[in-house]
Amino acid sequence: MIANCLEFSSGVAVVGGVANDDAAAKFKNLYWMFVAQQRHYSQRNKEKDSRNMEAASTKAGVLSHLSLLEVQARSRRTQPQQQSRVKELKAKVEALKVQKQQLEAEIETHQNLQKLRLSLDKQCADEEDVEMEEDSENSQLLRLMARHTQLKDLLHAHHLIGGYDIIKTHQGKGVCVSLATAYEGVYLDTYNLEIDLKPTVKIGRHNIPPFIPVNSLAEVNDMQTNMRAFLDALSQHLNAFAGRKQQLKLLREQHKSVEVMESNVLCSILVLMFKVPSAKTAVLCTLDYTDHSSCLPTRVHFECEDKQLPDSDQWKKNCSLLMETPVHTALTAMKKMGDIV
């Protein structure tokens, strides 16, 4: 548009003065119209840019606000976890404090027990080296605890040697082992066995019954290298023999109506006769103890004039009862059920 105005002004310049004045006026009008339009366009562009900037600023502000809200929400979620963790750590600290106090008390008690143990071992509990007042409330309890600990140590040492009483013989060249037998909580016979250790390990004198295979047990269990296994096997045989003999004794004492027809020294065979009240007949019962390391029979056999009686269900149960329980206990149960007199 500026070019058109310039062309117009140059064309009017060759005309007279009046024409020049009119042309100049038109040119000024056109020029100011152009300037006004340019200002208008410029103002519109500025307003548009301002709106764009405001929109961008608003968008950025929204995003920033959303980000802040997200951080706050995350903080709210982690805050209870942190509080829970703090409580957990505080509880752990309290537990450790209690444990510390318990350990301190145990250490103090252990020190007192050690002092009392020394006094008990030396048999001088009343001497002044025990730094504890006699009238203390805990002194009696601590003395009992010290005695208990001493007995536990002795029991542990006894267990280490297999639970057998062993003493040295022949100036340390041999040992004498005492093997006690018991049945149902009652101590019975005690047997002694001398074992020579030098120059080689071998069995010496003993009072074990001759029907107990001492030498065979020593060979089978390799007494030269495993003394504990040999003593365990020998003790098992002796206790089984003592148990069978004790059962026979209890049978004779508790069941007068049952007649012992036959038995041997090893108590490995036992023949009994008892009467059946319903059939009014006698039953011959044979108990065979072929396993000499057990006090229960391995075979039970019934003989009766009534051939069907041993095959009945009730007497099959009696057979199982005699094989699974001691004979005097089984006969008591059979009497209660009315199977024998």
Image: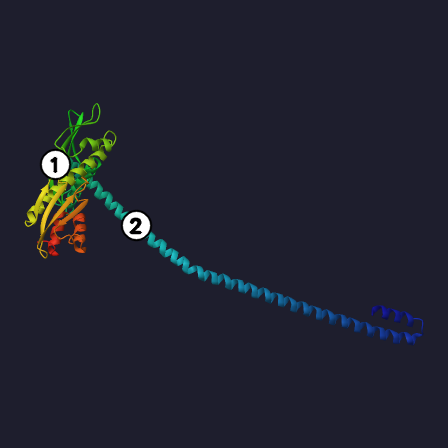
Residue drawn at 44 percent across, 61 percent down: 77
Q: Indicate left or right for 21 with 234 as reference.
A: right
Q: Amino acid at mark 1?
A: Thr
Residue drawn at 71 percent across, 71 percent down: 44
Q: Position of residue 284 (x, y in %)?
A: 11, 48
Q: Amino acid at mark 2?
A: Lys
Q: CA distance from mark 1 to mark 2?
A: 55 Å
Residue closer to the observer: 182 or 245: 245
Residue 126 in sight from this viewpoint: no
Residue closer to the observer: 201 or 87: 201
Query: If the image is split into quadrants, where does the N terminus sit?
Result: bottom right
Rendering quarter of residue 108: top left
Few, some or many residues within 10 Å of mark 2 (<14, 14–19, 20+) = few
Residue drawn at 19 percent across, 55 percent down: 313
Residue closer to the observer: 307 or 243: 307
Residue 22 in sight from this viewpoint: yes
Total count of labels: 2
Rendering quarter of residue 29: bottom right
Location of mark 1 (residue): 190
Label located before the other in sequence (1 or 2): 2
* Colour scheme shown: rainbow
Q: Position of residue 299 (x, y in %)?
A: 18, 45
Location of mark 2 (residue): 97
Few, some or many residues within 10 Å of mark 1 (<14, 14–19, 20+) = some
From the viewer's perspective, is residue 23 above or below residue 258?
A: below
Residue drawn at 23 percent across, 35 percent down: 229
From the viewer's perspective, is residue 12 above or below residue 76?
A: below
